[in-house]
Image (spheres, rainbow, N blue to C red):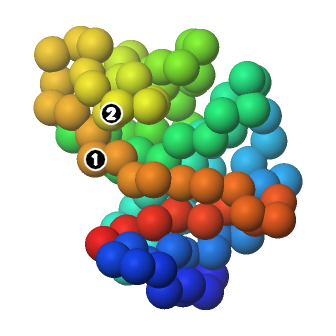
Amino acid sequence: MTAVMGSDAVGHRLGPLTQVPMGEGRAFGVDGTQVAVFHLRTGAVHAVSAVCPHKGGPLADGQIDGSVVLCPLHLNAWELATGCSRSGQPDLQTWRVEIENDEIVLYTH
């Protein structure tokens, strides 16, 4: 992973988009934080906290239902675009993520 400086954000190159097959998620370590990157079947890519706030489940291993991820431990649900909970749990942190030259770039401040 390499960092790219922007105006007020730092872009972290996570690797080629092919690392995250369509319809799946993968976890990445970014600045000491676990981030789950999801590649939806629509082609959209989203990044949220990789750790379920309920019991610490691995969200990158969760099932994707449209634009929602379900935690594999207790099936709590979050919107991937916003990180908003659909099941009464705390919301997830989200990050801006872009695909540049077929490479995943995650932006932090």
Q: Nearer the viewer, residue 16 or 9?
A: 9
Residue 18 image offset from top left, x and y in percent: 84, 54
Q: Quadrant of the C terminus?
A: bottom left
The image shows residue 102, relative to residue 51, as above or below, that is: below
Q: Amino acid at mark 2?
A: Gly
In percent of the image, x 36 and y 24: which residue is there? 78
**Of all residues shown, which one is farthest toward the front?**
7
In percent of the image, x 63 and y 74: which residue is there? 13
Near mark 2 (Cα within 10 A), the count class, few <14, some 14-19 or many ≥20, is many
The image shows residue 6, relative to residue 61, as above or below, that is: below
Q: Quadrant of the N terminus?
A: bottom right
Judging from the image, what secondary structure is the residue with disc 2 in?
Answer: loop
Residue 49 visible somewhere in the drawing: yes
The image shows residue 9, relative to residue 103, as above or below, that is: below
Q: Mark 2 touching mark 1, by CB under 8 A?
A: yes
Residue 49 image offset from top left, x and y in percent: 36, 49
In percent of the image, x 21 and y 33: which residue is there? 91
Q: Amino acid at mark 1?
A: Gln
Judging from the image, what secondary structure is the residue with disc 1 in?
Answer: loop
Q: Nearer the viewer, residue 89 or 7?
A: 7
Residue 57 placement: quadrant: top left
Query: What separation in Å lies between label 2 and label 1 (alpha carbons)?
Result: 6 Å
Taking 89 as reference, is 7 left or right?
Answer: right
Residue 85 image offset from top left, x and y in percent: 25, 22
Taking 61 as reference, is 95 left or right?
Answer: left
Mark carried by residue 83 = 2
In percent of the image, x 54 and y 75: which residue is there? 12
Residue to which mark 1 is pinned? 93
Mark carried by residue 2 = none
Near mark 1 (Cα within 10 A), the count class, few <14, some 14-19 or many ≥20, is some
Q: Earlier in the sequence, mark 2 or mark 1?
A: 2
